Amino acid sequence: MPSPFRTRAGAALSALLGPVPLSRSQALGASERLSAVTSLLSSLEHLTHRRHRRPGGLNDWSISRESYAGQSRPVRRLLDLVAAERVNTALHAGRVAASAALLLPGHGRWRGAANLFLGVSGALLYPVHRYGTDGSDQAAGLVQTATGLARLSTTPQVQDALLWYVAIQSNLSYLVSGWVKLLGPDWRSGSALSGVMRTRTYGNRHVWLLTRRFPRSARLVAHGVLALECLFPVLYLKGGRLTRPVLGSALAFHVVNGFVMGLGRFIPSFAAMHPVVAYTSTPRSHPAVAGRDDRLLGSLALLAGAAAVGAASVAVSRRLRVTDSAQGGWTVPTRHGNELSPMSTVSAGGAGPVVVFEHGLGAFPAHFGWYTRALNAAGVEWLACARAGYGPSRRLAAEPYTLEESVGDLADLVAAAVPEGRQVVLAGHSLGGEIARRAAVRLGERVHAVVYLDSSHPGQLNRSGQQDKNSGMIDETVGALMVSLRLGLGVLMQTPEWIKNLPAPLRGRAMAEYADPRLWTAARREWRAAERDFRAFDGALDPLDTHALVLSAQHTVDRDPEHLLMHQDLAAAHAPERVVRTVVVEGADHDGILTSPEHAAPAIRHLLDFLAEIGSPATVEAR
């Protein structure tokens, strides 16, 4: 006969484990009411904080509307209408009324119309309230649209399909968030919680002090959050045996976030998905969910399989295009065993210095598209090449990567691709500028000039607090892109605006390279080597007896004045008797100085004027 203690323990365990059996009607009702709380709070907040929409406010539409300048005229007119004071107020007042009505008891089809109104109006209002609108409003809109359609449908199969849609979105919201966090070293080490609590936006001084006082407990909490998010779908295993502890932990997580981080609307918005998760995770044999239609899962599995095949096909097609040499398979072997695949207009009968372009971190030769077009028009020969590991250039080196490998590769490329006796002008962007500077030291008299295009500086991590702070974020961002693309998610990438700004013949290949995981694998390898190298920099730049042009992007130096001083250091390292020019390109940012036609144009004019000023080596000697 079991002891009373074991009986009570078993009863307590059975109360903690097992499914949460909700019927279709109960799940619908609970989800729509919780999401209605979110929209009620959101609209009341916007109605009581109208100052944010006034001129100079956080959501001043005269400023925010510029973000939608590329939309069609009907879309712009609709958004202007929604942003109008009277219309905006009326929409929020309607949302308050609809949300309050949905909190009342009842199961009428009018509830579907109210839910759809909340979902559609929320989508319309989002562009007008971009700042202050967070993931809770988007989650609520998703639930309201799905439950609204379910309410209006008279077919149980359609209702179940819509509820499964919400349940899948709920699982993905936790799953994706968890696995993205897992890519960050701070979350893996358990130190992320302390870092988040220290921020101004979401931090809490008292909680931060607790994480400092009890670091082991803080790490345990951080790892617990990771486990909860990464393993959220386990509640569907074993007949929903883990549904109660998983949903209870998720609800507790949102409640704590709401109070500690000031994300109050996150509590009802994400909790609104939990009743649907409970409904779909209950075994079909349970009376509460009798007749539930689960065919959507099978359909989604087929679609996922087809999507995976399609994504793999796109990835293979892009890889073949990226690794295809631009000039008929011509390669240059280097001292490190790498094989470079250059592009060039260098001719045997050409004269004058050859401009050699060196691209930046996570970039490729197409970045210089506007520059090469201008040089072609001016009759100046040029040479560009993807570094080893990028595009068609193969990295076969056996030794761990250092920046000196790329420096040696660039020197070997010049020796092989530029006829003996002709000098070069090394032009490097970002990290490419630092590689070009070091290669100029190695190449000696073969270098006529160095052109720094918003270049990196080896002391930037030691001299600039902003650069030091951003260094970890660069590694994390590049790592996340690398992993995502390896998983075949490149097919989901949208073409960034800077690629759309490149010359038309270059855009297709540029997008293929941008979405290729090899690019980001090489970028991460280079950044880690550059970070080690830059942190060990002793502060002395090698002197160079060459001409120099230092072009700085205005946004770069405005955001970090120390960078302007470092660019001046690059200029000062060149011999004073040579032509040395420093220019800030007005309005340009770090990438736009190359890719934006508007800002590349003045930079190119400065480059052509500089080339004309320094002349050919023979002209310089005659002076």
Image (cartoon, helix red, strand yellow):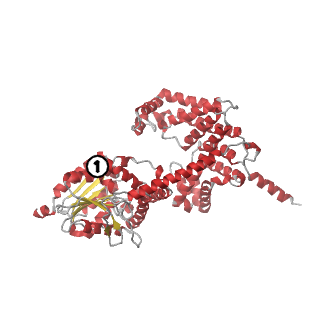
What is the number of callouts on the image? 1
Q: Residue 548 is drawn in which quadrant?
A: bottom left
Residue 460 at what x, y percent from top left?
A: 36, 60
Q: Quadrant of the N terminus?
A: bottom right
| 222 horizontally vs 395: left or right | right
Q: Residue 80 is drawn in which quadrant?
A: top left
Tell me which amino acid carries mark 1.
Ala
Q: Is residue 541 visible?
A: no
Residue at the spot x=75%, y=47% of the render? Answer: 285
Residue 366 at what x, y percent from top left?
A: 33, 54
Residue at the spot x=43%, y=59% of the render? Answer: 520
Vertical placement of 102 versus 420: above or below?
above
**Residue 95 versus residue 389: which sits nearer the camera?**
389
Residue at the spot x=43%, y=35% of the render? Answer: 61
Residue extending farthest to the left is 622
Which residue is label 1 attached to?
A: 600
| 44 horizontally vs 326: left or right | right
Vertical placement of 81 versus 470: above or below?
above
Residue 254 at what x, y percent from top left?
A: 62, 48
Estimate how packed mark 1 is, as few (under 14), some (14 to 19) or many (20 or more) residues with alpha carbons within 10 Å: many
**Residue 304 versus residue 519: which sits nearer the camera?**
304
Vertical placement of 223 versus 160: above or below?
below
Q: Is residue 103 visible?
A: yes
Q: Quadrant of the C terminus?
A: bottom left
Residue 544 at what x, y percent from top left?
A: 24, 66
Q: Which secondary structure lies at badge 1?
A: helix
